[in-house]
């Protein structure tokens, strides 16, 4: 998917919502285990059907699938195939946080872009350029690079300052990595719980898309994210996982997830309109 196609989807749906499919076998409604032999996939499918017209992206977190072994990988593959077959306009991100020496990264890239139909994969930049560039060799695919995360541990390294320049590590990551790709094939993870830092991020990467987790259950503010992060092509994919997919644990879980997604989409529509993007 191109950057222009992604922006067109945002304009058409009046939404920059990404729904995180962090599907935890311990949190999905109990009745699904009685009604189907495939409860995790049925849960995913129902959530997707309920929210597809309200969002522009889905982000399966691979840890929730890898944790249950081969069955989890099978569910992940079928989930991606289901989205592709029924909602081909969706941007699908593998939240895998890969990143290794070049030949290993090439195999990871082949997994997600060659064997599976993801549009992007989250990549950790710590090992440098040769660990990232294999993901950038696939036309129409994207790297989503970790830059400034929303967890408490972000302060352990990401805000460390260069003794001479005062440049913080996340700023160094942004400046250096922006030369590896373009705003057509690289976006960055910037946590919503650090929304005020988006001004500094935008000073370095003004045109790139940002994947912003942390809105909703983690306490991030959508309005603050938009205030500091929106650009002329929106430039934001705001992820919400638990607030939407676990809004109810009863039989109405899909309908309730839809209501939560509608609330977010309505707020996003107002933001896009105020920015004259729709």
Image: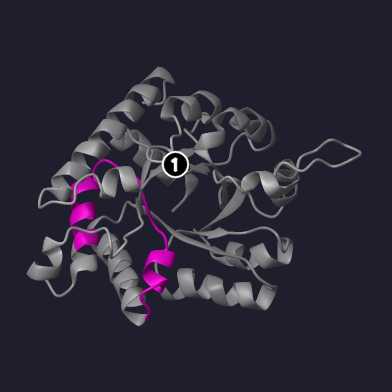
Q: Is residue 233 above or below residue 143?
A: above
Which residue is disc 1 drawn over?
237
Q: Position of residue 119 (x, y in %)?
A: 44, 59
Q: Is residue 6 above or below residue 229?
A: below
Q: Residue at point 18% right, 58% down? A: 29
| Residue 29 belongs to the span the image colors magenta | no
Q: Residue furthest bottom?
A: 70
| Residue 68 belongs to the span the image colors magenta | yes
In this rendering, would 115 be left or right of 107?
A: left
Q: Is residue 176 above or below residue 171?
A: below
In this rendering, would 173 be left or right of 219?
A: right
Q: Which residues are magenta?
A: 43-69
Q: Position of residue 53 (x, y in %)?
A: 23, 43
- Estimate how packed mark 1 is, as few (under 14), some (14 to 19) or many (20 or more) residues with alpha carbons within 10 Å: many
Q: Residue at point 35% right, 41% down? A: 9
| Residue toward you, 151 or 49 | 151
In this rendering, would 171 be left or right of 163?
A: left
Q: Is residue 12 above or below residue 63?
A: above
| Residue toward you, 23 or 198 | 23
* Residue 212 visible in the shown view: yes
* Residue 178 visible in the shown view: no
Q: Secondary structure at mark 1?
A: strand
The quadrant holding residue 10 is top left
Q: Residue furthest right?
A: 164
Q: Residue furthest top?
A: 274
């Amino acid at each position: 998917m191109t950057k222009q196609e992604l922006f067109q989807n945002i304009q058409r749906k009046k939404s920059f919502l990404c729904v995180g499919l962090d599907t935890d076998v311990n949190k999905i409604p109990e009745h699904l285990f009685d009604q189907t032999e495939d409860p995790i996939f049925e849960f995913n499918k129902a959530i997707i059907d309920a929210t597809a017209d309200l969002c522009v992206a889905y982000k399966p977190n691979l840890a929730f699938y890898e944790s249950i072994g081969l069955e989890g990988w099978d569910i992940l593959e079928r989930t991606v195939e289901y989205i592709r077959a029924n909602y081909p306009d969706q941007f699908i991100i593998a939240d895998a946080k890969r990143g290794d020496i070049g030949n290993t990264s090439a195999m990871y890239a082949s997994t997600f872009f060659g064997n599976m139909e993801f549009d992007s994969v989250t990549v950790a930049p710590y090992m440098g350029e040769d660990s990232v560039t294999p993901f950038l060799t696939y036309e129409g695919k994207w790297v989503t690079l970790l830059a400034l995360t929303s967890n408490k541990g972000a302060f352990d390294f990401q805000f460390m300052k260069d003794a001479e320049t005062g440049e913080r590590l996340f700023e160094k990551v942004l400046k250096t990595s922006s030369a590896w790709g373009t705003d057509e094939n690289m976006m960055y993870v910037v946590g919503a719980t650090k929304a005020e830092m988006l001004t500094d991020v935008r000073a370095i990467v003004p045109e790139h898309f940002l994947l912003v987790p942390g809105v909703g259950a983690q306490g991030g503010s959508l309005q603050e994210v938009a205030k500091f992060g929106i650009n002329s092509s929106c430039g934001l994919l705001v992820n919400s996982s638990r607030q939407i997919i676990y809004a109810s644990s009863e039989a109405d879980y899909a309908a309730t997830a839809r209501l939560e997604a509608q609330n977010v989409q309505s707020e996003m529509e107002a933001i896009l309109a105020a920015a004259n993007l729709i």
